[in-house]
Amino acid sequence: MANVKSKADYQKMSNAELVSYLDKLDRTTFNAYVDADTKVRYFVDKFGAIFIKAIKGTGLFLSGVIAQSILESGYGRSNQAVNGNNFAGVKYNKNIHSAFWTGGDGTKWAKYSTPEEGINNHIKVLLASRYKSARLNAKSPEEQIKGFVQAGYDSIPPSVYLSKIKGNIARVRKLLPFGRID
């Protein structure tokens, strides 16, 4: 096991120190030994400003979208995120995407040049007409996420999908206490 720090040690680190330290941990150690609060802080410190800029004026709840990306990208540490800046598990479509990354099982994943491009694509997906009702009518991030899943974002039941990200919605909301950003 790598020389991992405690949650108290992480709390003493600046944002830059935390991101730098955790970026050096291998994914197995990161997943097994870093607490959820620290993982969310890491993701928000690394990508939060990009999300804020990307969702401005869209009607999307910031904490819900970030929590969704955390799930879909393994806190930005999945193969799709690391190798393709793909934060939403978007599969490659030759009619839409210019590049792809091939996973170990042969799946082709959409590949983006930068984290900004990948995050902007995630937002673009959520702006599709099939998600309009969830974007406009939801009163909370949780309600919006359930609406996305009901509209076909994922094939698992909406309540199951929401249960996977509900804790991270709260963690993100604590770090970035915004709802919708006009």
Image (tube, rainbow, N blue to C red):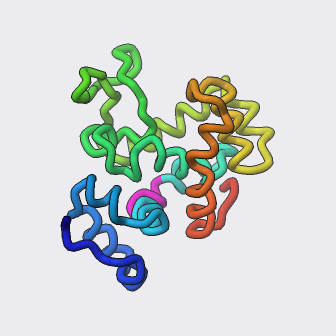
| Total number of numbered discs in the rendering | 0
Where 80 falls versus 95 (above or below)? below
Q: Main secondary structure of the magenta part?
A: helix
Location of residue 142 in the rendering, given as x and y in whole percent from the top left corner: 70, 47
In the picture as drawn, the residue positioned furthest to the front comes out as 1
* Nearer the observer, 181 or 4: 4
Where 44 falls versus 15 (above or below)? above
What residue is at 40 percent from the left and 20 percent from the top?
Answer: 96
Quadrant of the snapshot with the C terminus: bottom right
In the picture as drawn, the residue positioned furthest to the top comes out as 95
Location of residue 104 in the rendering, given as x and y in whole percent from the top left corner: 22, 28
What residue is at 20 percent from the left and 73 percent from the top?
Answer: 3
What residue is at 70 percent from the left and 41 percent from the top?
Answer: 144
Residue 134 in view in this figure: yes
Quadrant of the snapshot with the N terminus: bottom left
Write down the quadrant of residue 12 in the picture: bottom left
Write down the quadrant of residue 173 in the picture: bottom right
Residue 49 in magenta?
A: yes
Which residues are the magenta region?
A: 46-50
* Nearer the observer, 6 or 110: 6
Write down the quadrant of residue 119 in the picture: top left
Location of residue 180 in the rendering, given as x and y in whole percent from the top left corner: 69, 54
Residue 182 in view in this figure: no
What residue is at 45 percent from the left and 67 percent from the top?
Answer: 41
* Nearer the observer, 170 or 31: 31
As drawn, is 136 to the left or to the right of 34? Answer: right
In the picture as drawn, the residue positioned furthest to the bottom comes out as 12
Residue 129 in magenta?
A: no
